[in-house]
Structure formats: C-alpha cells, structure tokens
Image (cartoon, helix red, strand yellow):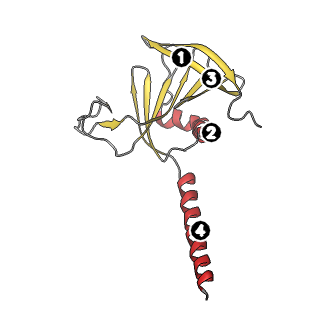
Amino acid sequence: MTINNKKRAVLLLAGAALLVYLLWLFLRPVEIVAAHHKNGFTDLLVKNFPFTDRGKINWWLENRAMLKEKYNTPYLDEDGTFWVTIFLFGDGYQKDIIDERLCFDEIKSELRCIDKNAVMTVFSDRYNQVFFSLGKERYILRNNGKLDRSESFKVTNLDKKICISDVEITGGPNADK
C-alpha cells in the first residue's frame, strides 16, 4: 500500500467515525429527567434535547400526549393557559451555592438545584395559541395548526396572567414548504 493510499484510508476511516458520531449525536432520544410544577409553571429537565429550532418544536408537538399522560405537562392553570420551560439537566442536581441556579423547594436534599440552561419555553394564551420561545427566535402555533415565526412578542407575567403584546408575524420554519 502506498503512502497516498494509507492517507486516503485514514481520512476515510476518520470521516466515517465522525459521521457515525454526528448521527448518534443527532438521533439519540431525549431523556426526561423530571417535571417540577409550581404556581402554574412547569420546569421540565431533559438530556439530549434537539439542537435546531425545528427539532425542538417538532419534539414538543410529537410528544404532547406522552408529556401530558406521564408528567402532567403542560399543567393547565385555572384559566386554561400553561407555561413550560425546558432546561438541560447538564451536571444534574447541585448545591445551592450559586445565585444563578434554579432550585426546587420540593426536593428535600442539599442537591436540589440546576444550572439555568433553558433551551425552550412553551406557553399558551387564553385563546389556545401556543407560543415557542427559543433563544432569540419566537414562533406561534395558530389554532389552525399553522406555525408562524414572530418577529417580536412581549410576554408579561402579572399575577399568573400572561399578557402577550406587539405580535408581528412572518413566515415560520416551515414557510419554505
């Protein structure tokens, strides 16, 4: 075998290994660690959450029935609205030694906090529209099933009443289809 053939074989093997790793990274199932409910809000702790906005929203839509059945999520408030924030579980439950951690009072252990690494917030209004907040991106799932990207919406939580204002709509992640 010549040197060029050896280099080619090594590069091909490295490329195949990289491809297998990327496939594993993108196709591994989401693991739900816990769901914590408090004051009409739910914090869902997960591992292996999808990377893309489309993957995150599709995961939510495909798993709504399972989340409701197994975790009582989304937990509907008195007015029929819900608010779910999905956090990466990261290094697991930790001590409350950093102010930036989210702690769960119902856990009676010193290991009861997580790092605040929210990857998606999903909430509804009283008209049953579902809103997705993913970092800087915002989407609205209309009652007719259409998903639109919102250039901006402001969310105010006053005494558990969610007010959504200044909604401007453009094409959603499925607009190309």
Comes first in the chain, label 2 or label 1: 2
Q: CA distance from mark 4 to mark 2?
A: 26 Å
Front-lying residue, 56 or 6: 6
Mark 4 crowd level (few <14, some 14–19, many ≥20, 10 Å Cα): few
* Residue 44 visible here: yes
Position of the N terminus, as image quadrant, is bottom right
* Residue 103 visible here: no
Residue position for label 2: 54
Q: Residue 175: which quarter of the image?
A: top right
Mark 3 crowd level (few <14, some 14–19, many ≥20, 10 Å Cα): some
Local secondary structure at mark 3:
strand
Residue position for label 3: 151
Which amino acid is tagged 3? Glu
Frontmost of labels 4 and 2 is 4
Comes first in the chain, label 4 or label 2: 4
Residue position for label 4: 16
Residue located at (54% from left, 29% from top): 136
Q: Please report contact status of discs 3 and 2: CB closer than 8 Å, yes or no.
A: no
Q: Residue 42: which quarter of the image?
A: top left
Which amino acid is tagged 4? Ala
Query: Total number of numbered labels?
Result: 4
Q: Residue 109: which quarter of the image?
A: top left
Q: CA distance from mark 4 to mark 1?
A: 46 Å
Local secondary structure at mark 1:
strand
Local secondary structure at mark 4:
helix
Q: Is residue 99 left or right of residue 166?
A: left
